[in-house]
Amino acid sequence: MNYILKNWVIFYTKEAIKTLKLVTIGSAIVITVVCIKYKPAYKVTISGETIGFVSNVNKIEKKIDKYMNDTSGNIAFRQISESPEYELKLIARDKEIKDKTVMLAIENRTTTTYKKYAVIYDGEQKAVVENQQEAESIINEVKADLNQEVELKLGIAEVFSTDNIVNSKEEATNTLTQLKVAKVTEYQTKKAEEEKALAAQKRKAFVANQAMSIATTTTVGATGSLNGMALSIPVNGSISSRFGSRGSSRSSMHTGLDISTSLGTGIRPITSGTVVYAGYKGSYGNLVIIDHGNGVQSYYAHCSNIYVSQGQAVDSGTTISAVGSTGNSTGPHLHLEIRIGGSPVNPQNYLY
Ligand SMILES: [Zn+2]
């Protein structure tokens, strides 16, 4: 019994050793084959998509962290939709294990936001530059020679965007300089117009004063009468030369009343009558003479245009001619002459 048991043990031990040997050899062969064909590596995935293989998770995580937290230059921050995942695998020996491939894939899936500085004019973004100092220096340069009365509403604002496109300092300065020039021109135009309006106002006040002094020296208004005939003024305007005065342009006494107004203004006779002359006459230029009967005639000189002809009957509603500067004249005006019995009389005795 003892002998049988002993033999049995020996037999099985031998078999076990044999099996163990076979298993060991077999495993060695398998491991050798596996080691020849495969290698261990971490598969990196993002949202289930394989982006590469790395040998060291710590190392790649550090690289990714460094990239994601980079705030050099104009970078404000970086975002990636999902974090990478790692899985240890046996991969074919010929498959490449490269951190660079993974980093490129990470970079492609990352959104970088940049911080820039906008120069604001009148609430609108006109240029974008890299940093605040540059924006400030542009504003200072643009404002440097600015007239104090011209207000340029300039400001700086932080801008965040996913592109890193900025204007060069020169471009930004040019853009804003153009805006400044436009503003200055606008200011100068406005000022010139104001001055013009003021001058016109002064002129108007002067004419009004003159009219008032005329009104006080003569008792008749804008209309009057002569020999029982009702008279009316031929044009509205300002009196630039009175009867009897001597101007720089004439040596003899002034035989009429000069009324200045704009070129082309219609002239009406002081009262009804008949045209006895309509044409050019020496220093009178284009002249219309109307006979009112009772030895009274009126002259309308320096006209730019004549609308009536000799023999025509007219009344105070007829436009006989237009204000001009023909003949001996320095500017558009009507020279009104009233003659009684052939002698010029002062129109202001009967008109105004
Ligand atoms: Zn005159």
Image (tube, rainbow, N blue to C red):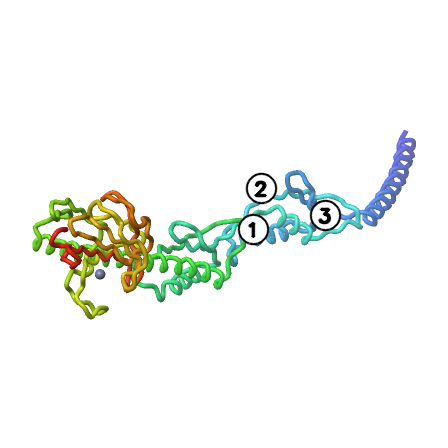
Q: Amino acid at mark 2?
A: Ser
Mark positioned earlier in the residue sequence (2 or 1): 1
Q: Which residue is mark 3?
A: 41
Question: Marks 2 and 1, Cα distance to the nearest angstrom?
Answer: 12 Å
Left or right: 284 with respect to 20?
left
Percent of width and height locating residue 17: 87, 41
Q: Is residue 148 shown left or right of residue 17?
A: left
Residue at 86% in and 45% down: 29
Q: Earlier in the sequence, mark 1 or mark 3?
A: 3
- Please report the residue visible at 25 percent of the width from the left and 56 percent of the height from the top: 334
Residue type beneath disc 3: Ala
Q: Quadrant of the N terminus?
A: top right
What is the x, y in percent for residue 257? 19, 58
Q: Is mark 2 within 8 Å of ligand 1?
A: no
The disc label shown at residue 53, or none: none
Name the residue beneath numbered marker 2. 81
Tell me the mark number nearer the camera, choosing from 3 and 2.
2
Mark 2, residues whose alpha carbon is within 10 Å: few (<14), some, or many (≥20)? few
Q: Report ligand 1 position as a quadrant.
A: bottom left
What secondary structure is found at the residue carrying circle 1? Answer: helix
